[in-house]
Image (tube, grey):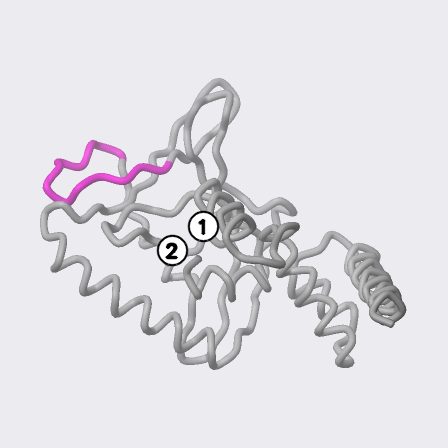
Amino acid sequence: MQKKNIFFSFYLTKAEVCGLTWQDINLEEQYLTVRRSMRYNGARHKTEIGATKRKKIRTVDFCDTLAAILKAAKTEQHKNRFRYGELYSLNYYLEVKEKDRTYYEVYSLPRSEEVPEGYKELSFVCLRPDGAFEAPSTVGIMCRTARKKVEGLEDFHFHMLRHTYTSYLLSNGAAPKDVQELLGHADVSTTMNIYAHATREAKRTSARLLDKVIGGE
């Protein structure tokens, strides 16, 4: 899994990670703005971008480590444009109105292909080497692959990283309300429930260690 995806997972959902563009990121002041998310509409068989789950824009500060990873990723994307040449893909969205609803479909097209009328370019942060956008389903596949290949990650899923981050912040003195806003939870009770669940799991793990000690004797 790409490093930036792992670090983003502390702050964002899969859908929000895939919907990030470079215009959402301020590398100098080290913050990003969560404006949209990406999802697959099974009924329409289309990948779409739209509002986040809470339909709320939020700002997230990030650390030096993620800033360095993002700078490296931006450089790598620039290099890939030259490596792939005309085969490098650019990404677009198309506004589609059906009855009383509006959809924003996402497409990847090779640079050599003529851009259809109405397509507007998007500069996504999370791209494949050939420039095509990364879909949330692909991130899910990477997580399932990690579960199979890495010992100890049998129960791993993408959202666990957000839970770990939540617990780490609260256990180190962060204000619950600040953590709620940082992660985009609907209310502070969601934040505290995650922390309580993680704390219970940690206690259970510690308790099970006693079985190993006794069994070893």
Q: Residue at x 37, y 33 (%)?
A: 95
| Number of the label disc, if any, that sits on residue 18 | 1
By secondary structure, the bulk of the magenta-drawn segment is best described as loop
Query: How many angstroms separate mark 2 from mark 1 (CA)?
Result: 6 Å
When asked about the image quadrant of residue 79, the answer is bottom left
Residue 210 vs 5, above or below: the answer is below
- What stretch of residues is rendered in magenta? 106-118
Q: Which quadrant: the N terminus?
A: bottom left
Q: Position of residue 106 (x, y in %)?
A: 36, 38
Three-letter amino acid code at the position of disc 1: Cys
* Mark 1 crowd level (few <14, some 14–19, many ≥20, 10 Å Cα): many
Q: Secondary structure at mark 2?
A: loop
Q: Which is more toward the observer, 142 or 124?
A: 142
Left or right of residue 125: residue 56: right
Residue 116 magenta: yes
* Mark 2 crowd level (few <14, some 14–19, many ≥20, 10 Å Cα): many
Q: Which quadrant: the C terminus?
A: bottom right
**Tags 2 and 1 in contact by the CB under 8 Å rule?**
yes
Q: Residue at x 42, y 72 (%)?
A: 26
Left or right of residue 61: residue 84: left
Q: Position of residue 185 (x, y in %)?
A: 71, 55
Three-letter amino acid code at the position of disc 2: Cys
| Number of the label disc, if any, that sits on residue 126 | 2
Residue 95 vs 31, above or below: the answer is above
Q: Secondary structure at mark 1?
A: helix
Q: Which is more toward the observer, 180 or 13?
A: 13
Q: Residue at x 26, y 34 (%)?
A: 118
Q: Residue at x 37, y 58 (%)?
A: 125
